[in-house]
Image: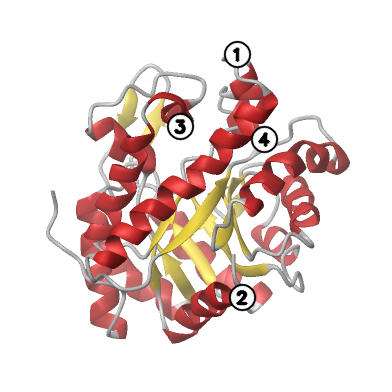
Amino acid sequence: MTGAQARSLAAALADGAVVLDGGLSNQLAAAGHDLSDALWSARLLVDRPRALVAAHLGYFRAGARVAISGSYQASFEGFARRGVGRAGAARLIASSVSLAREAAVLAERDGRGRRWVAASVGPYGAVLADGSEYRGRYGLSVAQLERWHRPRLEVLAAAGPDVLALETVPDVDEARALLRVVRGLGVPVWLSYSVAGDRTRAGQPLEEAFAVAAGVPEVVAVGVNCCSPADADRAVPVAAGVTGLPVVVYPNSGERWESGRGWVGEPTFRPGRVAGWVAGGARLVGGCCRVGEAEIAALAGAVRGRTGHGGPGRGGR
């Protein structure tokens, strides 16, 4: 990432809220791609990379200004289990950034203004593909987590994203490990926890969780994702108050995942919530699981109505 890109992103956050994309997995599933694999959406880096470009571009055309790459569940270990060597895995992980960048360039050529790429850095538990990213407490020390995350983060940083998205982090230990790794990489980051109520998934108070990001020069925003919209409502002012940083917030649809039943319940993600998020300090706003193009288009419209910008949108698909 160049210094000019970093300044552009910082300037956008200073000017007002910037719209993120929605859930990549539901975007891909809606296009007919099978994600029933331990690699989840990262499988498409191997055999359907153009699908990722199309998914990112769909969100850009819906009004998102930031695409989060398809590297959430990509790892050296995961690709090794598929017979991909270390050099090949590094190329695949890096390709997640270049594919998102291709979509950003296409959107900019459409006259949609500046677009950015966030390289997704999922938690250790995501690679286990057993749901442990929603529990944390893996039995690993901060130092062990730091050693595990470092190679992947170095590859992603070298691929040239505008920001590293340290996302769906379930506990404070993993956040500390990630923040150790990003020092000196030369890429800004946001830190986003997965939460339940007023605590991390591992049970730590949010005040403690957000505090680890305070004073870390690489961190440009802190907040929550992959949680209920109601939990996001409560977390935004806490994140802003503890750190004084811009807040990132991109919750799920509000439906709940139940093993054996799939997604249940009614969606509670409403674009009208953006007013409360922005008033509470949010400057990066979007959606996670089960939030699609239609919701991002409406969210972008709400941001434009509140701040006067946020990127052109379109109707739902």
User: Any mark on residue 45, and which?
Assistant: 3
Of callouts 3 and 2, which one flags the residue occurring earlier in the amino acid sequence?
Answer: 2
Q: Distance of mark 1 from mark 3, alpha carbons?
A: 14 Å
Drawn side of residue 11 relative to residue 170, left or right: left
- Density class for disc 3 (Cα within 10 Å; few <14, some 14-19, many ≥20) is many
Of callouts 4 and 1, which one flags the residue occurring earlier in the amino acid sequence?
Answer: 1
User: Any mark on residue 124, and which?
Assistant: 4
Drawn side of residue 301 relative to residue 315, left or right: right
Task: Reply above or below: 257 against 55.
Answer: above
Q: Which quarter of the figure has residue 147?
A: top right
Residue at 76%, 44% (x, y): give it.
Answer: 150
Label 2: which residue? Answer: 3
User: Any mark on residue 244, and which?
Assistant: none
Numbered disc 2: secondary structure: helix
Q: Distance of mark 4 from mark 2, alpha carbons?
A: 30 Å
x and y percentages locating residue 253 in the rendered image = 33, 47
**Residue 46 visible from this viewpoint:** yes
